Image (cartoon, rainbow, N blue to C red):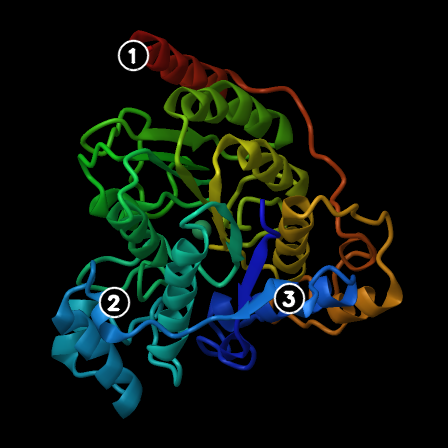
Amino acid sequence: MQTPRFIGSEIYRGSSYGARHPLSIPRVPTVTDLCRALGWLPPAQYITSPRAKPEALTAWHSPAYIAALQTAEAEARVTPETRARHHLGTLSNPVFPEMFRRPATAAGGSLLATDLIAAGGTVYNPGGGTHHGMADRAAGFCYLNDPVLALKALLAQGLTRVAYVDIDAHHCDGVAAAFHGEPRILMISTHEARRWPFTGALDDRAGGQAINLPLPRGTDDSGFAMALHEVILPALQALCPQAIVLQCGADAVAEDPLSRLSLSNNAHWAAVATLRPLSPRLLVLGGGGYNPWTVGRLWAGVWATLNDLPIPDRLPERARSILAALSWSRRPAIPPDALLDTLRDTPREGAVGDDLRSAIKTLRARQSAWA
Ligand SMILES: [Zn+2]
């Protein structure tokens, strides 16, 4: 098996959705810098992301929407009609200088990744994972939907058993809309119950075989481990996927401001380690993650897990200084020492509540009925 590849771009450094937006923080630059400081990212494993051409984006997005997005970037403004029709220039999807180039770069990275893993392999594109983008409009900080484009590219390669696993704190409504009733894609999503976008209920099968597991508020590592081993793992083992796309959003950790889940980054790394041997092709994407320290630490640990690299108990000064240099407009402006001195969180374990046990039982019963 070839060495894993890391797809990044300098476009993520210095571009921002605006000072008051949750995506004002650097995320891909932090994970890139941390991995380099730890000696984990030799030049041979790093690939600069290409920018997807507009034609490539129309594999799912409407040409009118792509044109509107390019026009909004060029003119640095949107008309009321564009705002109403395509949801550009809104609070969640504002006009900013790289509003086409940046998401087109994330999409270009995910599309390149599908070429790189065509014959097998592992690629990590932490700038990808924008799972709320819709065919004709922006949503939930996502302008384009790179997971959808990557999955479509994998299907175009002739694959017929592709798994999409999404452990972001929010339901992957854009991906669900794109593949409603598509038998070649098995979509599995864990997400916080009763949180925006309010889709992905337990009984929502996305027109076929999709597995949606809403996690009760406060779900910790123990609850997630139960979901991983009793729902996600057996479903993937039954499928024998030819490719897995993992959306590894970092917003389900306790310190994230946009969810009320209580995972530690150990939960995400366990998911990566568990999924890795289950398919010859693996594409790992980023996603949500709105605390600058936790997202950088979590995604750096994902790369370590993909490469079997030992995670040090304490960060060397070069790596620590990258975290110490970050600032945040929200509280805490200065994080607890553990978020600067370590990469690995203290595990957050506890009793698994009845709500989650019952949801898992329902999904297991459905799986065994199918087997
Ligand atoms: Zn999210």
Total number of numbered discs in the rendering: 3
Question: Who's the residue at 22% across and 47% down the image?
Answer: 178
Q: Earlier in the sequence, mark 2 or mark 1?
A: 2
Q: Earlier in the sequence, mark 3 or mark 1?
A: 3
Query: Helix, strand or loop at disc 2?
Result: helix
2 or 1: mark nearer the eye = 2
Residue tagged 3: 44
Question: Residue 295, position in %: x, y?
Answer: 61, 57
Under mark 3, the amino acid is Ala
The mark found on residue 370 in the picture is 1
3 or 1: mark nearer the eye = 3
Whether 315 is drawn above or below 182: the answer is below
Question: Who's the residue at 73% across and 35% down the image?
Answer: 347
Q: Earlier in the sequence, mark 2 or mark 3?
A: 3
Residue tagged 2: 56
Instruction: Evaluate if marks 2 and 1 touch, with contact meaning CB atoms under 8 Å apart.
Output: no
2 or 3: mark nearer the eye = 3
Question: Who's the residue at 35% across and 45% down the image?
Answer: 172
Q: Judge: label 1 CB < 8 Å from ligand 1.
A: no
Query: Helix, strand or loop at disc 1?
Result: helix
Question: Residue 96, position in %: x, y?
Answer: 38, 82
Q: Is residue 292 left or right of residue 356?
A: right
Question: Residue 22, position in %: x, y?
Answer: 49, 66
Q: Quadrant of residue 243?
A: top left
Q: Judge: label 3 CB < 8 Å from ligand 1.
A: no
Nearest the camera: 53 or 302? 53
